[in-house]
Image (cartoon, rainbow, N blue to C red):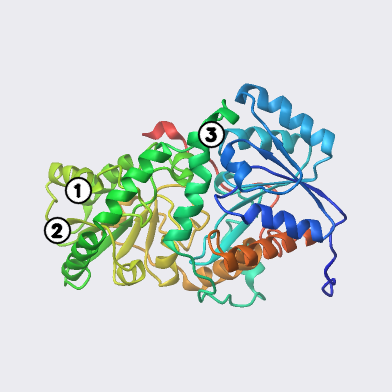
Amino acid sequence: MTAEMPGEAASPPQTFLFLQGPSSPLFARIADNLQRLGHRCIRVNLCAGDWVFWRRPGAVNYRGHLDHWPAFVAALMDRERVTGIVLLGEERPHHLVAISAAKARGIPVYAVEMGYLRPDWIRIEKGGSGHHSHFPADPAAILRAAADLPEPDLRAHYSQTFVSDALYDLMFNLPNVFAWFFFPHYRWHAIFHPLAEYYGWIGRLLGGKRRAREAEETIARVVDGADPFFVMPLQLETDYQIRSYSVFRSQRTAIKVVISSFAEHASPNARLLIKVHPLDNGLIVWPEEIDSHAKRHGVADRVHFIDGGNLNRIVAASAGVVTINSTAAMVGLQRGVPVKTLGLAIYDIPGMTDDQPLDSFWLEPKAPDLKLVEAFVRLVAATLHVRGNFYSEAGVEAAAAGIAERLHRNTVNEPGGFVDKPPRTRPDKDHF
């Protein structure tokens, strides 16, 4: 047990149910820390990859149909007297069912994800993110709650490599592909088959130097040029931020909408720079997708695509950022660059993002209130974030210790980062 901090009280012994987490040892390490703090941790493995990353006691393998999952998980919560649920991806089919059962029993749900702040932050949020989030959306409430909070240290403390990320991904997905018969009814929640993703990644790795060179050539023309330009940082097509927290069913539709609006309403000398996500698998040929829309609207000479380059440098020099709900927009907000969101985002707050229609944004983008942005960063860092990452030994250890301590002391979303009713509404998919 650890010594109690002045003014803080640890929670009584609890039973935490862990569901699916990242392809990383993080969840097992959190459980190790919680157990040392006097709590009990159990786990449901839904697939072979889950089993690989939970090599500790307290696991149950669920091999049944999704149709039978509601009764199973509800009975498990009752039988084991679960007092909290920890998961990643609250919109996954099994998780939605478990969350519903937890809410009916008054059991809090804690969602773990990559941080809103980057590069080496992990977040834990009570209730979840998107329209599940209880983080305040009222500017006055954010300013009040953050008034006495310290400035976070935004320097990188931990590093992780693509190699470690890829190895952990292989450790999770290959058992699911080749040992599927141990969990015959499990269905992968992603859009692409893992082997297809790896095929795409091989192509990207082989062409990496060429893409980087082409990106720098485009940056030299657009970013260092005299014409104003806007940036659209792409997200991963499989991102639940798009699938669950936006009006779009695909990023392709968002690109079509943005280019159409840009062509019709932006200044004739303005440019649009679309940047691919650094972890994109290459299975969608974005240059062709973008070029076809740009040609259709007569702006092929003003719409540019890059697969590489320093996002901070590009955004800082831009006239504005357009995004569905990428956390890359935080780069713009922290630098005073106007940001227009097209989906549901925790940072989409009056005074921070531009609330006018996209068609108007191109001509008169509104800069964020930096005082409010600074307060938001202080509050979100203090209440929802811990230092660390998913894929390095030191980063995992730091994140696991930080999250376990938050759960142990019941300080997730505290101080001041929780309102009783989620203040954000789920977007209507029927719009597109």
Q: CA distance from mark 2 to mark 3?
A: 56 Å
385 shown above or below 174: below
Nearest-to-viewer mark from 3 and 1: 3
Taking the image as shown, residue 359 lies to the left or right of residue 373, namely left
Q: Residue at x 53, y 34 (%)?
A: 179
**Label 1 Cα crowd, 10 Å radius (few <14 / some 14-19 / many 20+):** some
Q: Position of residue 301 (x, y in %)?
A: 11, 55
Nearest-to-viewer mark from 2 and 3: 3
Taking the image as shown, residue 306 lies to the left or right of residue 70, namely left
Taking the image as shown, residue 137 lies to the left or right of residue 254, namely right
Q: Residue at x 69, y 38 (%)?
A: 44
- Label 2 element class: loop
Q: Residue furthest right?
A: 12
Q: Position of residue 225 (x, y in %)?
A: 17, 71
Given the image, on which type of amino acid does mark 1 rest? Glu
Given the image, on which type of amino acid does mark 2 rest? Pro
Q: CA distance from mark 1 to mark 2?
A: 9 Å
Q: Which residue is mark 2?
A: 268
Task: Using the image, tell me which numbered label, if any, was put on residue 179.
Answer: 3
Q: Position of residue 248 (x, y in %)?
A: 39, 39
Near-viewer residue (361 or 5): 5
Q: CA distance from mark 3 to mark 1?
A: 52 Å
Q: Is disc 3 in contact with disc 1, using a CB cutoff of under 8 Å?
A: no
- Label 1 element class: helix
103 shown above or below 154: above
Task: Using the image, tell me which numbered label, if any, was put on residue 264.
Answer: 1
Given the image, on which type of amino acid does mark 3 rest? Ala
